[in-house]
């Protein structure tokens, strides 16, 4: 996939996902954030958490090397944000990887996920490429794996106790190999986003880890009302006495 990201279609994809990431993670607060895979995408560029890590399956400059994302070297409930840019599609066991992400996230922590949409022009091309691969032909599109559908992923997240906060699709142009022809189809992005939004080549979603039964504590500085039968101060008694005397004189 790393070689394909250098193609016009790959750069088009990275540009859209970078914009979405920059907007989504900028206002997610905490102390510890982790990006798993795809170092070509600077997913945490606009995030302000003081401790950030980038992990990759292969040795990459500026990234930590992890052979398996299904066994993360972090304690349970220790990360505030985990970003998965196409990580589940490239994982040997996406279910276990997602469960591991749920384990390391703190309650109310966020996970941000990018994935390819199988119900799209790119999804159809992927199916054709996989067919050619089985016939012995090579292709340079994407790894020979099935895409994980958007609604299927939402079901996985729900079973793990996540609540999807937002989700949408993007990249409606065909995966053309020419910059010139890719620009000619730029009109498809605004029209596709309005008229066939679920047919975008990729989807983007943000989900929050919910913990049922967790009680939120009220702030200690909250002002409380005095009880009705609270004792009256000396000054208060004097004011009441003068008021009664004034009433009696009238």
Image (cartoon, helix red, strand yellow):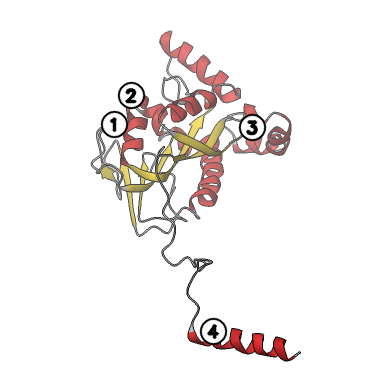
Q: In the structure shown, which secondary structural element does the residue marked by tag 4 occupy?
A: helix
Checking the image for residue 93, the label placed there is: 2
Q: On the image, numbered disc 1 is attached to which residue?
A: 70
Q: Which residue sits at x=73%, y=91%?
A: 249
Q: On the image, numbered disc 4 is attached to which residue?
A: 237
Tell me how far mark 1 sits from mark 4, CA to CA: 71 Å
Q: Check contact, mark 1 vs mark 2: CB within 8 A.
A: yes
Question: Which is nearer the N-term, disc 1 or disc 4?
Answer: 1
Q: On the image, numbered disc 3 is attached to which residue?
A: 172
Q: Check contact, mark 3 vs mark 1: CB within 8 A.
A: no
Judged by depth in the image, the label closer to the viewer, 3 or 2, is: 2
Up the image or down, 240 lies above or below 6; here it is: below
Q: In the structure shown, which secondary structural element does the residue marked by tag 3 occupy?
A: loop
Left or right of 195? Residue 91 is left
**Front residue (pair 113, 45):** 113
Judged by depth in the image, the label closer to the viewer, 2 or 4, is: 4
């Amino acid at each position: 996939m790393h070689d394909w990201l250098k193609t016009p279609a790959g750069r088009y994809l990275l540009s859209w996902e970078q914009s979405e990431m920059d907007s989504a993670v900028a206002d997610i607060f905490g102390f510890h954030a982790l990006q798993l895979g795809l170092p070509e995408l600077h997913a945490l560029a606009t995030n302000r958490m003081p401790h950030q890590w980038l992990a990759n399956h292969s040795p990459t400059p500026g990234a930590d090397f992890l052979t398996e994302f299904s066994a993360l070297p972090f304690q349970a409930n220790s990360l505030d944000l985990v970003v998965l840019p196409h990580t589940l599609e490239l994982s040997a066991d996406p279910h276990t990887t997602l469960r591991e992400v749920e384990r390391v996230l703190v309650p109310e922590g966020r996970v941000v996920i990018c994935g390819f949409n199988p119900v799209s022009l790119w999804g159809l091309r992927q199916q054709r490429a996989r067919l050619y691969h089985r016939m012995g032909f090579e292709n340079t599109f994407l790894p020979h794996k099935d895409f994980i559908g958007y609604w299927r992923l939402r079901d996985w997240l729900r079973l793990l106790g996540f609540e999807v906060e937002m989700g949408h699709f993007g990249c409606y142009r065909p995966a053309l190999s020419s910059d010139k022809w890719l620009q000619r189809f730029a009109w498809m992005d605004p029209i596709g986003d309005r008229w066939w939004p679920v047919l975008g080549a990729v989807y983007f979603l943000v989900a929050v880890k919910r913990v049922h039964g967790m009680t939120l504590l009220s702030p200690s500085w909250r002002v409380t009302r005095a009880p009705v039968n609270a004792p009256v101060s000396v000054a208060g008694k004097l004011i009441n006495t003068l008021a009664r005397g004034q009433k009696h004189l009238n």
